[in-house]
Image (cartoon, helix red, strand yellow):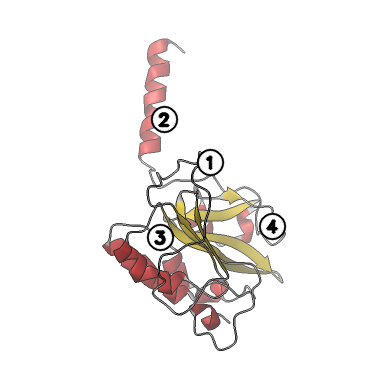
Amino acid sequence: MDLAAATSATKDAGADALERPRWCGGRLRGDSSVLPEWLATMLDGHAWPSASPYAALPWSRTVCEHVDYEGAWRDHRALFTEQPRTGAPAPSALWEAKRALAKSGTALLLDVQVELVDGRLALAIYGAGVRGWLDDVAWKRVAGLLTTCCSMLHEPHEDVVPFDLLPSMKRPSSSGKRALPTPVRPLSRESGYGSYTWWGYPVHGTPEAGCSCAAHEVA
């Protein structure tokens, strides 16, 4: 191939990449026949590897805002109830937070894995959050929806630059001090380095007796 042809091919490849700007991960890897076609199509291009023994495929985890899990919940709700675990909010709380963040121009990222539970497919939610620092308005809108008594909350420093992961010894992690707009308190909370305001939801958790957080709405 001559230089002109190679340059043209490179431009074509670049154009193809630009036509798929929502791709943020890799292709599904493994026997994707275990997934219905609509789900495989939805996840393709957003998949990340997982070492979990419950993962349906070697690459079946997504951590992004591009996959329409709300649509999946609306049309295939049983997938969200197959995984017998606690800690995460009810999906309805996540969609409410998603819409509230969209009003402020921020996207909700979800950490979701496709799993096999007793041979049945399940969509398990392991985390939710946003890139960077949440301003006070957005914080008040969503912190109460995303915080459960089993959650692990991490807030970046206010001046964090998203994706700047280089630490500074002058800024150690500390306990988060911003007021939560809910009486519910997370299992753990810290403010430090990292590019995300993030709520992690454990595989197993023990909801507090008498707590009214959204985690208790999950079967």
Q: How far apart are marks 2 and 3 (CA)?
A: 30 Å
Say which of marks 2 and 4 sits in front.
4
Is there any visible trace of residue 24 in the rendered image? yes
The label on residue 13 is: 2
**Image quadrant where one finds the C terminus:** bottom right
Pointer 3 residue = 108
Rendered location of residue 28, percent (x, y): 58, 49
The kind of residue tagged 3 is: Leu
Residue count near mark 3 (Cα–Cα under 10 Å), binned few <14, some 14–19, many ≥20: many
In the image: residue 48, left or right of residue 54 = left
Q: Which of 123 and 215 is in front in this view?
A: 215
Residue 18 position, x and y percent, is 36, 37
Residue 112 appears left or right of 52: left
- Label 2 – label 1 distance at C-alpha: 42 Å
Image disc number at residue 52 = 4
The earlier-in-sequence mark between 4 and 3 is: 4
Task: Identify which amino acid the numbered label 2 is placed on.
Answer: Ala
Residue 37, given in percent of the width and then of the height, sits at: 53, 59
- Between tags 4 and 1, which lies in front? 1
Disc 4 + disc 3, Cβ < 8 Å: no
Q: Which amino acid does label 4 sit on?
A: Ser
Labels 1 and 3: the sequence-earlier one: 3
Q: Reading the chain from its start, which is encountered first: label 4 or label 1? A: 4
Q: Quote the CA–CA distance across marks 1 and 3.
A: 30 Å
The residue beneath circle 1 is: 169
